[in-house]
Amino acid sequence: MFNKIFNTLFILLIFVFVSSCQHKQIEKMPDIKAFNHSFSNYDSINLEHIYLDLAVDFNKKELHGKAILEINNTSQCKFLILDTKQLSIEDVKLEDSVSTAWSLGEEDKILGQALVIELSSTTKKVAIYYHTSPDAEALMWLAPEQTLGGKYPFLFTQSQAILARTWVPCMDAPAVRFTYSADITCDKNYLPLMSASNNFKKNPEGRYHFEMPQPIPSYLLALAVGNIEFRRLGENCGVFAEPEMLEKAANEFVDLPKMIKAASGLYGDYAWGRYDILVLPPSFPFGGMENPRLTFATPTIIAGDKSLVSLVAHELAHSWSGNLVTNRTWDDFWLNEGFTVYFEDRIMEHIYGKKYADLLMQLSVGELHATLDDMMQSAPGDTKLKLNLKGRNPDDGVSDIAYVKGAMFLKYLENLYGRKVFDDFLNAYFNHFKWKTVTTEEFIEYFQNHMSKWPKVKPDLDEWIYQVGLPKNCPSIGSTEIKRLDEMVNKINQSKEVKLIDTTGFTTQHWMHLLRTLNADSITTIMTQIDTTYHLSESTNSEIQCDWYVLCIKNNYKAALPYMEQYLMTVGRRKFLIPIYEQLSATPEGLKLAQSIYNKAKKGYHSVSRNTIEEMLLKDTKH
């Protein structure tokens, strides 16, 4: 009898506990439609500030805690709709105290799920308790062996383009700018950093506070946690890195104060307070990410001779083009990247001279032509500056079109109006749209109004922005160094003599152009001589290695394959991975090798890189 009563009470307690854990669902869901890659109703409710209180758990590979969103609901909307993906929502409270109904919408493979929250007429704050998934696409959890030091794990985020929603419930659209603050708790052995005000040393409590007083879009939310140290480079700048990388990084970026001064002299004062760089472990999928106050950078730019620091100039330039003035939608991505490549070129010219800047730009134009040759066959619509990414992953818009075609369009305008007039426009543009977002059409309207005082100059905006390919009036760079290299390559292709390679004054970029323009078939017999003379297979310069290994695959030069495999096992930058895997996949034998290497290397790649490579390998398998 006692057992029967006990069992009944136990079942009743379980029922009460389960019932208390079930939150109130929204009875009638609003109509949810994706707009500009976001489910959120940002057109009706203003998101003004996000406060994050998160703990970092390396064992579970998750962040857990809460996000408090401060909103301005002047439209008196009944619901707040946010973007989430791979998040486990535990509870939602208004003003962080009053329970409310909430529900998740249907899941979309690219966009995730809408989080719909019922509001009161006076709601100013919404607290969301949640934890992330170990597989969250924005979060890269590195085991100790995947770091340079090899002793401690490491975490970093990559929120661009629409991955912020995988670690923070938010309005994940570049049209939405908000300030944020955070308290991050972690093990005392680690130092957390964010795209905000940062601490420079670890503390024994393992709790750190961050403030970002300037409004940013969600894709610039950033967090990194690891065994990180700091080295000061100037009054308002420095470098963070693992201790084993810190000295090399500090030496490589010694010109950073000059770059900040040069950029500010061109287009107005630097508006973000500090500018620091975090050198990440090799699995970071990009060259750099322009997180405000704290650029994330790949270690592949540490070449030892400053020959790859143009990437730093690029990310610094984003402090104006992208961070200060932001593309409203991902269809307008060129407004971020085209302006930044143009600005980067101007910084490099100011510090290192026009001859070197022209060499860099002409290399980029060469890459653009290769991209155009491919895309005009496969996706001609994506060669327009103004894109149409509806229903697609916005990462599809990340190509040389936005970057280099965009920059050449601005060079075209500079040539038409003269540098001084065009610089006046750019200064006015950055000042007019400061802390705002802008569409392509708004750019055109502002440009035409500003330049109306020069009525005789009539730029062809439509052909550059809305038509496919590269216009015939694209400026010519005319690098003298490229001309010298092309003459050298022609002689080598004809005579097949290694001694004709004259490396006098060679930088990384000289090698890149040489390797890209050598005719693979014509130099088959001298590949071994080239490698023996210059030790390219054993190079530690990631740019040179990538171009050399692609040439080796084309030539079936198998002596380089073990070095290439090791390279693919240790480098996670998508720029280097894609051309090598693509070239390998061109033959059945190479595809088999590519799949074998990828299966071993993929744990060290970020999801952004994995998604691209898996799509490529799957496509090749189907064919």
Image (spheres, rainbow, N blue to C red):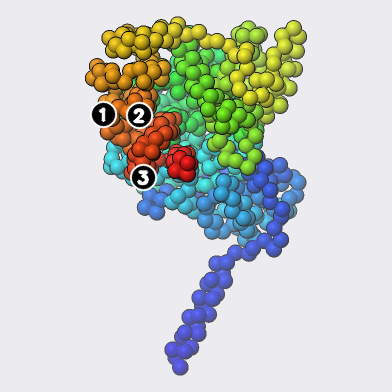
Residue 534 occupies quadrant = top left
Q: Which residue is drawn at 66% across and 17% down?
A: 428
- Counting residues from the N terminus, which is met first, the one under dot 2 or under dot 1? 2
Question: Local crowd at mark 2 within 10 Å, few (<14), some, or many (≥20)?
Answer: some
Q: In the image, what residue occupies the spot 34% across and 43% down?
A: 596
Mark 3 = which residue?
Answer: 599
Quarter assignment of residue 583: top left
**Whole-percent x, y for residue 612 in the image:** 47, 39
Q: Which mark is on residue 559?
A: 1
Name the foreground residue: 354 vs 493: 493
On the image, the x and y values in percent for residue 145 come to: 29, 42
Instruction: From the top left corner, tell me how far across and down residue 467 is, in percent.
Output: 66, 24
The outermost residue toward the left is 532
User: Looking at the rendered structure, which numbered label has been put on residue 553?
Assistant: 2
- Mark 3 neighbour density, 10 Å: few (under 14) some (14–19) many (20 or more): few
Q: Please, what is the three-letter code of the amino acid marked with disc 3? A: Asn
For residue 215, side relative to residue 591 (left or right): right
Q: What element carries label 1?
A: helix
| Residue 441 shows in the view | yes
Question: Residue type at mark 2?
Answer: Ile
- Which disc is residue 448 wearing? none
Q: Which of 554 and 190 is in front in this view?
A: 554
Secondary structure type for disc 2: helix
| Sequence-first tag of 1 and 3 | 1
Q: Earlier in the sequence, mark 2 or mark 3?
A: 2
